[in-house]
Image (cartoon, rainbow, N blue to C red):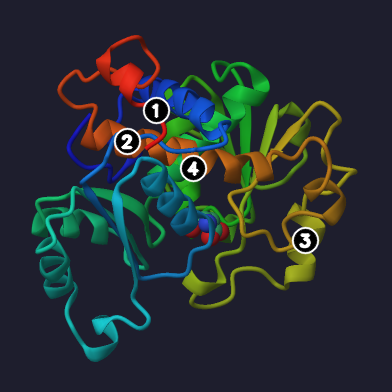
């Protein structure tokens, strides 16, 4: 794996398998009363978020803390960005603390790649505009494999606002790499032109939704819409909303959150047994622990926690 995690394209299938395996080891740590290992003791992780976040920021914080790193969390609101400091100056300022990793979220596509050029730290893209969100895709793979027992051959339908969704882009790549068949579905105005080149099929109605093993619903990303893409949310919900009538009994349901209840999903399916939405949130911590470990401690062939080596016996000890 490369020094940074900017895109799912940075990961081979073997890299993904290794990260999912590491996450399994960390799940064991998360089941303990003291959910902490000393792996990153003395190293610094900085979370820099220029856009709203609940799940991603809190799970990266917990992941860094459970690995015993020193953690600094900076939100753009209330930081010197409000005083007009440029992104480059902010990155250079924070780099003065010698962070091992910088977790970065921005409303601008490609911004994480720029940050990687300005800091010696390993940069993890925690969402850059509508471009990518690679750790979301990894935690989705992890969650789905745990529930379904496999990924190879699964038929995944990603439904909704594909055009503005970084989750859709990262997940088309990630599910495809792990051998799933991916279909994206939504109103034609919300399907990006040429999306098939990422390795998926396109549908503009839910008529064939019954073929899916997994329905992955997306939120309408209003914050990235300039103009109107659907006649009304009511009309959208009527044509593309997933409810108990549309979701088959054997189908699994995923959503990256936050969910707009009554728009892309009805309350009955959100809270139903086929939904993996809470599992996805839970997986966020162990998968992000695995990514931090892989980038900061796993590079030189260092063995994973719990695999019968010096580090293995050391890592699971309480810090
Ligand atoms: N939480 C995901 C993201 O940050 C999905 C969403 O916001 O709808 O991209």
151 left or right, relative to 100: right
Q: Are marks 3 and 4 in contact (CB under 8 Å)?
A: no
Question: Mark 1 = which residue?
Answer: 317
Task: Tell me which label, 3 or 2, sits earlier in the chain.
Answer: 2
Above or below, 291 relative to 100: above
Rendered location of residue 88, percent (x, y): 13, 70
Q: Secondary structure at mark 1?
A: loop
Q: Name the disc covering residue 285, or none.
A: 4
Q: Is label 1 or label 4 in front?
A: 1
Q: Is label 3 or label 4 in front?
A: 4
Q: 265 or 282: nearer the eye?
A: 282
Q: Which residue is depicted at the point 42% across and 35% down? A: 173
Rendered location of residue 120, percent (x, y): 9, 51
159 left or right, relative to 126: right
Q: Are marks 4 and 2 in contact (CB under 8 Å)?
A: no
- Measured in 3D between alpha carbons, the distance from the residue under mark 4 to the one under mark 2, in whole angstroms, is 16 Å
Q: Name the disc covering residue 38, or none.
A: 2
Q: Are marks 1 and 2 in contact (CB under 8 Å)?
A: yes
Q: Secondary structure at mark 4?
A: helix
Question: Mark 3 = which residue?
Answer: 237
- Measured in 3D between alpha carbons, the distance from the residue under mark 3 to the one under mark 1, in whole angstroms, is 49 Å
- Measured in 3D between alpha carbons, the distance from the residue under mark 1 to the one under mark 2, in whole angstroms, is 7 Å
- Measured in 3D between alpha carbons, the distance from the residue under mark 1 to the one under mark 4, in whole angstroms, is 18 Å
Q: Secondary structure at mark 2?
A: loop
Rendered location of residue 115, percent (x, y): 18, 59
Please identify the quadrant where the N terminus is shown: top left
110 left or right, relative to 165: left
Q: Mark 2 packing: few (<14 Cα in 10 Å), some, or many (20+)? A: some
């Amino acid at each position: 794996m490369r020094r940074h995690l900017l895109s799912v394209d940075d990961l081979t299938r073997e890299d993904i398998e290794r990260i999912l395996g590491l996450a399994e080891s960390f799940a064991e740590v998360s089941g303990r009363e003291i959910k902490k290992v000393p792996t990153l003791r003395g190293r610094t992780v900085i979370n820099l978020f220029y856009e709203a976040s609940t799940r991603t920021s809190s799970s990266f914080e917990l992941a860094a803390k459970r690995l015993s790193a020193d953690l600094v969390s900076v939100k753009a609101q209330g930081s010197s960005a409000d005083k007009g400091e440029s992104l480059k100056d902010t990155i250079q300022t924070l780099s003065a603390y010698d962070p091992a990793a910088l977790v970065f979220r921005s409303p601008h596509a490609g911004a994480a790649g720029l940050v990687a050029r300005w800091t010696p730290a390993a940069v993890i893209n925690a969402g850059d505009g509508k471009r990518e969100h690679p750790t979301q895709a990894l935690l989705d793979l992890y969650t789905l494999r745990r529930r379904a027992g496999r990924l190879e051959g699964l038929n995944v339908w990603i439904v909704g606002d594909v055009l503005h969704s970084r989750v859709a882009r990262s997940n088309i790549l990630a599910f495809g790499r792990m051998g799933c068949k991916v279909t994206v579905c939504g109103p034609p105005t919300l399907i990006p032109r040429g999306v098939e080149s990422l390795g998926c099929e396109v549908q503009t109605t839910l008529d064939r939704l019954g073929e899916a093993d997994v329905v992955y619903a997306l939120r309408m990303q209003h914050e990235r819409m300039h103009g109107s893409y659907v006649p009304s949310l009511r009309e959208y919900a009527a044509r593309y909303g997933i409810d108990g009538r549309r979701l088959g009994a054997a189908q699994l349901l995923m959503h990256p959150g936050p969910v707009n209840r009554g728009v892309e999903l009805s309350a009955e399916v959100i809270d139903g047994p086929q939904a993996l939405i809470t599992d996805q949130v839970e997986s966020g911590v162990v998968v992000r622990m695995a990514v931090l470990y892989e980038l900061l401690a796993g590079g030189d062939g260092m063995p994973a926690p719990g695999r019968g080596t010096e580090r293995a016996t050391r890592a699971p000890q309480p810090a």
